[in-house]
Image: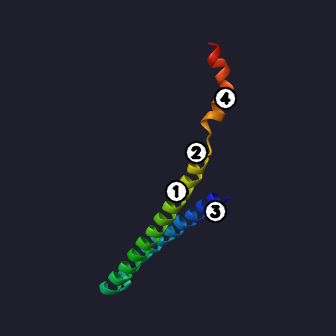
């Protein structure tokens, strides 16, 4: 359940980033009505915000991957080779 929630949160972050990109293009279209300095400042803020969200998304992705590898590690550590091969030993010894 935790992994599904992590995926849902990642999807929401990606969707938010897409909305930020569309607002960037809206700013670009409004540039004709603003002076260049103001537009440049707004653009820099938008780029910084987009990079922060990208890093947040990447951090969340890394955390999700780390947690999923811990689940896999636990499953692998619980493998008992002697117990798993026990049913096959009589067949192998007979041949």
Q: Is residue 9 above or below residue 93?
A: below
Image quadrant holding the C terminus, namely: top right
31, 71: nearer the viewer:
71
Q: Which residue is mark 4?
A: 86
Q: Which residue is mark 1?
A: 65
Residue 4 point in image, percent of width and height: 64, 58
Question: What residue is drawn where x is 57% and y is 66%?
Answer: 12
Q: Secondary structure at mark 2?
A: helix
**SS at mark 4 in the image:** helix
The numbered disc on residue 21 is none
Q: Which residue is mark 3?
A: 5
Check residue 76 in the rendering and tell me which mark sits there, or answer none: 2
Separation (CA) of disc 3 from disc 1: 13 Å
- Along the viewing direction, whichever of 59 and 37 lies nearer the viewer: 59
Q: Secondary structure at mark 3?
A: helix
Residue 7 is situated, as x and y percent measured from the top left of the image, at 59, 59
Q: Quadrant of residue 36?
A: bottom left
Front-most of 44 and 30? 44
Identify the mark nearer the N-term, 3 or 1: 3
Marks 2 and 1 sit apart, C-alpha to C-alpha, by: 16 Å
The answer to which of marks 2 and 4 sits earlier in the sequence is: 2
Q: Which is nearer the N-term, disc 4 or disc 3?
A: 3
């Amino acid at each position: 359940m935790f992994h599904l929630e992590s995926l849902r949160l990642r999807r929401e972050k990606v969707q938010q980033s897409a909305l930020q990109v569309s607002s960037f293009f809206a700013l670009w279209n409004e540039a004709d009505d603003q002076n260049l300095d103001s537009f440049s400042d707004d653009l820099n803020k938008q780029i910084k915000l987009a990079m922060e969200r990208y890093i947040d998304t990447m951090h969340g992705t890394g955390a999700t991957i780390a947690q999923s590898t811990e689940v896999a590690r636990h499953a692998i550590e619980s493998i008992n080779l002697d117990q798993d091969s026990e049913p096959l030993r009589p067949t192998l010894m007979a041949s």
